[in-house]
Each structure stands twice: as structure tokens, then as C-alpha cells.
Amino acid sequence: MADLLSGQLLIAALVLAGIYGLVALGLNLIYGTMRLLNVAHGEILMLGGYLAYWCFTLTGVGPIWSMFLALVLAGGFGAVVYRTLCRRVLRSARLIEQIEANSLLVLFGVSIILQNAIALSFTATARAYPYLDDIVRIGGFQVTADRLVVLGIGLALCFAVILFFRFSGTGLAIRALIEQPDAAHLVGVDVERMRTIAFALGFGIAGVAGCLISMLEQVSPFMGFPFTIAAFIVIILGGLGNIAGGLAGAAVLALIEVYGVALTSASMRSILIYGVFIAILVWRPQGLFGRRSVVR
Amino acid sequence: MSPPCFAALLALSAAAFAGIPFLAGDYAIGVALNLLMWIALTQSWVVLSAMTGYVSLGHAVFFGAGAYAMVLCFGSLPFWASVIVAGGATGLLALVVGYPCLRVRGPYFVILTFGLAELVKFVVINIEAALGQFGRLLFGGPGLAEIFYVVLALAAASAAITYSVRRSRFGAGLRAIRENEEAAETLGIDVARYKVLAFALSAVVPGMVGAAMVMRTTYFEPLDLFNPITSFTIVSIAIIGGGDDVPGPVYGAFFLVLLQEMLWANWPEIYMILLGALLVAFVLGVPDGIHGRIASWRRARG
């Protein structure tokens, strides 16, 4: 039991919460503005991880810098995916429920394509690189520097997004779109433009999250899906469009995962994640529609 | 197509397939077996997902659970009896998980079924690890021809099930749920019971197919038998084939097996990329699938 009270686990949970919060943030944006479940979200993260890996391995540029490149590239990719694929789903489907199921299948197709394109280009081997892995002592805790950097950047980015939604015109327009799509359209919000921006921003944040995760974990073509699932859990817990709630949800999930694994064994990790996921969906069958919340 | 017509066509196709083990070599039998397997799996999927609109992205769970039931029965029961036990077990599994799962709708149901299949996969992996088993070898099982005939029978049965459900009161109720669940309930359809029954019905044959196919590989490995690619392939075949009737899965399965034969062995990644691209293209461009295209082409010709 003494191990459970150590700072090591607490820091691990905090870092994981920061990552989950960041991944869920992007998913939340896309879901909120379009009611589109982006199942390819984890694959964007995987692409970000590969970008960071190759930047570091080939040119020695660290993920702290390559994450800006990831933001731009993943964001651009998001805008393209929205303009070419998702808009067509919205137009072609007969029923609203069909739109959602169809868009999910389309994005699932995209994620299969991305996984296998990366596996084809770089093989399925998991890859990692050493970066900032010296140990730092804070008080009684020992922690590697990369974890602190990930935690710091993750929190800073979440904070920046909260500020963006509170103060910038674009942020306010996107919030309006999440809360009252029809009313936002009536008062002159350019819906198409805002959706494209939300998609680009959502993908961009996922790309950055991928760069950060590549500092801590190995990257592999099939690493993405568990993160997508984790992000779904976080936004169901935290509430639609609710960024602060999302951070709280991320903390809850990270605590369950880290302490659950510490109490049982590492092989229980997937069972825990999927078990929590299924329990939450069955408990809230209306999915994310259940609570209307505000971006704070 | 009228029932006698359908019965005759089904009997003819089954007879044609039944001749394959006498005429062809092991490779051709394997290809035909593969084709029949995908037809059986996709027909079963259609009963639930195409008819009710509850798209399951987790049918691998029944395939894998059936295979696991076979593994547990192996040695104590004859092959055919184990196949039946596997079907009963997966049907029961569907009844148990069906009620809570089918309250979840639309895209949440899709992702829930995927998560459920992954959860069961990891549970089985952990059970096997706790039992000290790491992949089981299954020696002394049935031969290729015996497996072939069992899967042939399952494919024929699943086509007959799809045909008769599609034309029954029950099937009309399922399609009413797809079009408007609230309205269906108002009209007196016991929506919850219909959905759970369709779920169970769509689970039995995949369980039996999984049980038969694990004897083909003679090796039980949860990661292979609960592979999400199986679920993904079923959905792709159904979307490419199109519709909520018997022909769609048949067209889709022929198309897919052709693609598999050309690419899978040498270029698995390109095969998967192409399959993903086809899924995207058919959902966006040809939502009624090959079956729908053929039907409208026929109508246009009069």
C-alpha cells in the first residue's frame, strides 16, 4: 500500500491526465461543432508522433520545435478532410442518424488508410528516441524531465485554448455554433468557415499531442485507437464543449488507469479502459447529447 | 424473388459449391471456403445492422467467442456438436449484452460494439494467461473438406435467414425501427425485444463460423480470432454489396475475395488501404452499393 501513496504514481497520473485532456480537447471541438465522431483522431496523433520521431532522428530537431510543424500540417490535413469528405457526408445522407453512422464509417475508413499507409512506409515496428530523459528531483519526487515538459506544454495549450474561446471573435463564434447552431447561423456566423477552423484546430491539437506522446512512449502505426477511446471517455465524462469539465474528466480517467494498473497488473490496462468506456456508454445511452454545457 | 425461386437458386448454388472438394485442389477449396465464410458472416450482419440501422463494428466478437467455445469443447465433443454449442453460446452472449447495448444509438452504438469486441478480446487474453495458455494448438481436428461443408451449410442457412427475416412481420418491424424508432414503438412494435432478437440472431451464425474456422488454422490465438479487421471487413462487404437483402453480401463477398486473392498475400497494407478507400468511396458515392446499382440498371432497361 505504501507504493500507492508515492509521488511517482501521482505524477504519472498527472502527466497522463494532461495528455488525455489535450487529445480530448481536439475531439471535443470537432464533435461540438459538427456532431461528428472523429474516430480517426488517434491516427492524427500517431502521425504527429511519427513527425516528431523523424524530425528528431533525421535532423536532431526536438519535439518542442517539431510540434509547431505538426500543428500546421495536421491542421491543414483537418481542413482538407473536412472540405473533401465530411461535407459530402452531411449532404448525401437521407436521415440525421444516417449522417452520424455514415460519417463514422468514412472516418473509420480514413483511419484504416492512415494506419496502413504508415505501416507500409515505415514498417509496423514500434520506434522511440531518447530525449530529455535525465532525472529531475522535486522535493521528494523523482521524475524524468520529459514528463515535466509534456505536462507543462499540455497544460499551457489547454489554457491557451480556454483563453481563445473566451476572448477571440473566432472562438466565440465557434462556441455559439456548439451551443446553438441555428441561432449562430441566424446572427451571421459563417458556419462553413467556423467548422473548417474547428476541424483544423482539432486535428492540429491532436498532432501536437502526438509529438508530446512520442517523447514518453514508442510510436507505432496502430497506437492511435486507444487514445481515441480514452478521448471519448473524457468528453462523455466532462460534457460536450466543456473544456474545464474535459480536464476534470481526463484527471478521473488517468487516476482510474494509473491506480487501477498499479493495483492489478499491466495486462489489465486495456480491460480497464474499455470497461470504463462501455460502462459509461451504457450508463448514458444518449451519449454526449445528455448534457448541454458551456465552454468555459 | 418468390420463395420457391429463392429455394431453387439457393439449392443450386449450394450444390455447385458442394462439388468443389471433388473437383478442385486444396488451394481452390480454401478460396471457396473464404468466400463462403464472408457470405455467412455478412448475411448475419445484415439481419441486425442493415435492417435496423444499428451498425455493428464489433462482429468479430461473435466470431472469436465461437472459436473460443470450440477450443474449450475440443477433445470432449465431436466437431459438429461443438459447432452447435458455439452457436448457442454466442447467441446467449448476444442476448446478455444485447439489452444494455441496444439502448445506445447511432454512432455511439457503432463505437460501443467496437469497444465491446476489444474488451472481450482482452478478457480472453487475460483468462488464457491466467490458465497458463499462450496460444493453443488443436491437433486431430476435422479435415478441410469437413470444415468446408459445415461453412457451406452455414452460408446457405444465413442466406435463408436473411431472406425469410426480410420478408416476415419481424423484418418489417426491424426496418420500421431503422426508419423511425419512436414511430415504430408508437405503432406497437416491441422495439427492445425486436432489437435484442435481431442481435442474437445475427450472432449465432458468426459464432458457428468462428468455431469451424479455428479448426482450419488448428491454432487458437485471441489476437487473430478477435481481430478488429474481421469486423471492419464485414462492414465493408455489406456496404460495397449494398442493401438489406441476400444479394448484397454475395456481391460484396465475391468482390472482396477477388481483391484479397490479388493483394493480401503480397501486399497486405495496400490491400487494407484499398479496402479503406473503397469503404469511403462507397459510403460517399454509391450508398446503395453494387446491389443497388444493378437493381437501378435493371429498372432503367425496363
Image (cartoon, helix red, strand yellow):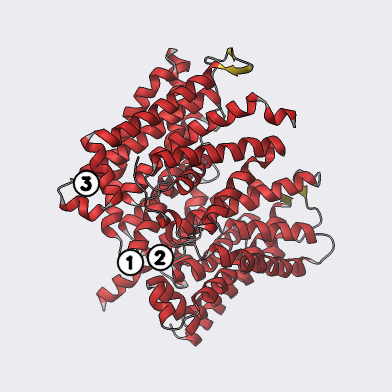
Q: Which residue is mark 1?
A: B293
Circle 2 SS class:
loop
The image quadrant that residue B302 belongs to is bottom left
Find residue B6 and report its horizontal and vertical position in percent: 49, 81
Q: Secondary structure at mark 1?
A: helix
Instruction: Give the amino acid type for the residue marked by disc 3 in the picture.
Output: Glu
What residue lies at 50% left-to-right and 53% top-to-bottom? B232
Q: Amino acid at mark 1?
A: Arg
Q: Nearer the viewer, residue A94 or B164?
A: A94
What residue sits right under mark 2 in the picture? B242
Could you tell me which chain the residue with mark 3 belongs to?
A: A
Is there CB contact under 8 Å for labels 2 and 1? yes
Q: Residues within 10 Å of mark 2 (few under 14, many from 20)?
A: many
Q: Is residue B151 left or right of residue A177?
A: right
First reached walking from the N terminus: tag 2 or tag 1? 2
| Chain of residue at mark 1 | B
**Residue designated by label 3:** A192
Distance in Å between CA atoms under marks 1 and 3 = 32 Å
Q: Position of residue B68 (x, y in %)?
A: 72, 57
* Image quadrant occupied by the C terminus of chain A: top left
Q: Which label sits in the foreground, 2 or 1?
A: 2
Are tags 2 and 1 found on a single chain? yes
Q: Examine the rendered structure and indicate whether residue A73 appears above or below residue B292.
A: above
**Residue kind at label 2, given as amino acid type:** Gly
* Residue A73 as seen in the image, left or right of residue B107: left
